[in-house]
Amino acid sequence: MLTTIVTMSGAMDAMAVEETAYSVVKKDQHFEIRDYAPHVLAETIADGDMGQAGNSSFGVLFRYISGSNQSQTKVAMTAPVSQQPMGEKISMTAPVSQQRVQDKWVVSFAMPASYTLETAPKPTDARVALRQIPARRIASVTYSGLWTEKNYLQHKQELEVWIRKNGLSASGEPVLARYNPPFTPWFLRRNEVLIPISTTH
């Protein structure tokens, strides 16, 4: 479902100079528990199914980092590009309380670590918002393959089972993370499902 578009192909060719910073707390085959540092997201909301939303929103975000902002600053692109169901309400200072609402999706990528919410270029497009994400613990599962909703849902379920088996508790909703340009062969792609988990048991 997450089919490619021309804008996305060109933009992601130079992607992944920097990834969102995290440290690995536990590794179990293709599952991990990670501690992520605070970071700022640039995000937009799109309608449609997972694929339609991913494609239509990417161009909006790419124009923002290409200089379509108040200071006309070009921002280095980071990995991953993330996508999740939209919440009823988006807070600028706390994680989204996500819930699927009328086929709307939040698509985002992390700003380079050098930026704070105060120093990040201010969007000129009202569809782009900046949001501060606090430090948090994440359970992840890494997999290759196509960017389909079926593939995502399968690995989301595997991660949810792993979380329960390890006596952990989810504290947020799943996020699909994509790390590679769309022309990367499906068997070489790095995809992840990320689920925030509680740090207290």
Image (tube, grey):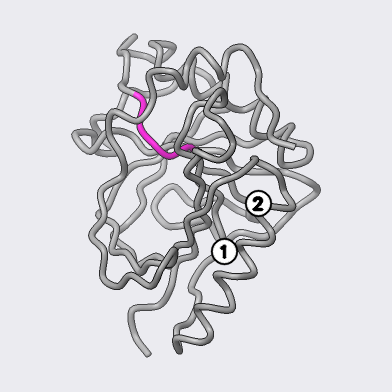
> Callout 1: helix, strand or loop?
loop
Labels 2 and 1: the sequence-earlier one: 2
| Label 1 environment density (alpha carbons within 10 Å; few <14, some 14–19, many ≥20) | some
Q: Is residue 183 left or right of residue 12?
A: right
Q: On screen, 155 above or below 25?
A: above
From the image, give the main secondary structure of the stretch colored magenta.
strand
Q: Amino acid at mark 1?
A: Glu
Residue 170 appears at what percent x and percent y? 50, 75
User: Which residue is depicted at the point 51% across and 39% down?
Assistant: 189
Looking at the rendered structure, the number of numbered marks drawn on it comes to 2
The residue that label 1 is drawn on is 173
Position in image of residue 36 (x %, y %): 29, 57
Question: Where 43 sits versus 25, above or below?
Answer: above
Residue extending farthest to the left is: 114
Residue sitting nearer the eye, 84 or 147:
147
Q: Which kind of residue does numbered mark 2 sit on?
A: Pro
Rounded to the nearest angstrom, the CA distance separating label 2 from label 1 is 8 Å
| Residue 78 covered by magenta stretch | yes
Q: Is residue 185 magenta?
A: no
Q: What residue appears at the point 48 percent right and 34 percent down from the top-left corner? A: 129
Taking depth in this image into account, of 185 and 84 the one nearest to the observer is 185
User: SS at mark 2?
Assistant: strand
Which residue shows up at 56% across the image and 34% down it?
44
Magenta stretch, residue numbers: 77-81
Whether tag 2 and tag 1 are in contact, CB under 8 A, the answer is yes
Q: Give the side of residue 188 with respect to residue 198, left or right.
A: right
Query: In the picture, residue 127 is in which quadrant?
Result: top right
Q: Which residue is mark 2?
A: 85
